[in-house]
Amino acid sequence: MTTIDSTLRTRDESRVAVDARTWLSSFSEVLNSKSLAGLSELFVEDSHWRDMGAFTWDLGAVSGFDAIKKLMEASVASLKPVNLELAANRPAPVPVVRSGREVVEAYFSFTTDTGIGSGLVRLVETEFGLKAWVLLTRLESVAGAEKYGRGNRPKGAGFDRTSGLSWHEVRRNRSSYVDYDPEVLVVGGGHHGLFSAVNLQKLGVDVLVVDRLPRVGDNWRTRYASLALHNKTDMCHFPGLPFPDSYPEYLPKDLLADWFEIYVEAMQLNYWNSTELIGGEYDETAGHWRVTLRLSDGSERTMSPRHIVMATGGVGGRPRIPTLPGLDSFRGDIFHTAKFRSGEEHAGKRVLVVGVGTSGHDTARELHLNGAKVAMLQRNPVTVVKLETTELVYPPAYFDGTPLEEADFMSMAGFIHPLLKDASRQIGKVCTERDRELLDALERAGLRIDEPENGFLWKLYERFAGYYFNVGASDLIISGDIRVHQTQDVQSFVPEGVAFADGKIEEFDTVVLATGYLNQRLETETLFGTEIANKVGDIGGFDEVGELRNTYKPTAQSGLWFTSSGLASGRQLSPHMAAMIKGALLGYVPENRNGYIAANGGTHG
């Protein structure tokens, strides 16, 4: 983060690598001792450890030395971690400032009885030498599963050249699943689904992606014309296939949709369009699912995958329809933003957008650009941030030419609850001060502004709602081109529009509900039943160990995984999930270790 991260040159750099290597050697000796004797000499009291599947077969973080020691005692002994050494393919250790603290930052690699891991440690100077303040460990692969990548391609031509079949014929046969089933079924062909499939495929897992839309990328292609990503392109690269340098700073939705199509073909993913998961049940005895898919021709196919990855949406699938007084009496069109495709068909119409989050603002702007007369109805205060200001919350490494994998590691090491909260609070104050002129102007225009104590980034992860990155709608509100009404001023909807408390009636032709989505838990219940939905619980928002709840980690239901959040998060989190699924397929660990970190001393403050 820009205001609290920087590079130092105050420490003798000739000694940095030696000191980091010495710490790793000592750490290795401690991990392989039966009692973990000497661990206290390697960590400061206020240290943090985030493990991404490498030792706990779970995803979470613990804070405080006592919690770290307790978790290591419970998880490390049976794994026999060895070969802890500085990573050969990463930068040498370097003195830097992270989260406002001077540290030596070092990348390392290691192996265990079950897999191959990578890590990042941030060491601080104490009177007794360097000690760990932040430790990140991630499972990259599992024993017996050679992970292909640069310099390690799959052998040969990828098919039997004596069979008489072309490569395309071989691909069609592999992806048709005529007489066998995939090991993993990924439901949803958005970025989370594709990232999950690519990482599983790298580990030799047979995986099929299904999506109910007719064309790869339609989840973006079919949305309104002016939509573009709110994060810079250099943060949003797809794993294994970065965007060309010619692509713009912010990706338009059509260009992104086309890239999805290119990606599926380039990565040779098994992908079924126009295919919908109807439902399924888990066979505990057999250790697999039995699911029903409805295909493009209306027929049904039953499959028995060992695992299901639900990648059906960022935060939810079913639109949230609020209860608004008199709305059922309104004679005009009413629809949710989930069905909003273009502002062209609303040219010249009077439209009320209910909700002032990102969808509400974007929809209102799109409608205005197409000639509609637009008003917004605000129910709750909203956090607004200039688009250029949002860059302050992301590691500068994403924008200064640092290799993407290193930037991702820096980001992952910062996603530890107390550190994230403190950083978000600090940056939030800076963002608010920087955007003060805009915020004051919006309030004068009638928009109620929320300035959250912990910053907008915290609000994003905790609620994934109630914020807007300004790409133009704020300017239209300030100019009066988009008007804002408050719910406390509204008495009721009436057949012709809205009746206000002062007796006035404003007529509208259309009401658009930009009111968000219900939790994915409801989709789980629809597809797999109430028992499984209750067992798993909600998806998203912070859990007891500071991660996104039930996201990219084992759930309480064996063989059921969920994804969530943005492109960068999906890229960061999908590798360890794929490795854990592969490990479960190989029988290394129980397929469900949910709550493992929490049960062994987890706390996030």
Image: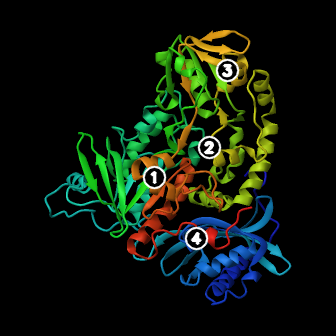
Residue assigned mark 3: 476
- Which is closer to the viewer, label 1 or label 4? 1
Residue assigned mark 1: 530
| Looking at the image, residue 336 lies above or below residue 203 | above
Which type of secondary structure does the marked residue at label 4 adopt? helix
Instruction: Measure the alpha-carbon separation of dots 2 and 4.
Output: 26 Å
Give the residue displayed 54% in from the left and 48% down from the top. Answer: 567
Q: Which amino acid type corresponds to the residue marked 4 in the rendered image?
A: Tyr
- State the image coordinates of residue 599 (x, y, percent, origin top left): 62, 71
Residue assigned mark 4: 596
Which type of secondary structure does the marked residue at label 1 adopt? helix
Sequence-earlier tag: 1 or 4: 1
Count of numbered marks: 4
Sequence-earlier tag: 2 or 3: 2
Camera-nearest residue between 247 and 461: 461
Q: What colour scheme was applied to this rendering of the protein?
A: rainbow
| Looking at the image, residue 500 lies above or below residue 199 | above
Camera-nearest residue between 16 and 169: 169
Residue assigned mark 2: 464
Q: Are marks 2 and 4 in contact (CB under 8 Å)?
A: no
- Which quadrant of the figure has residue 405? bottom right
Q: Which mark is residue 601?
A: none
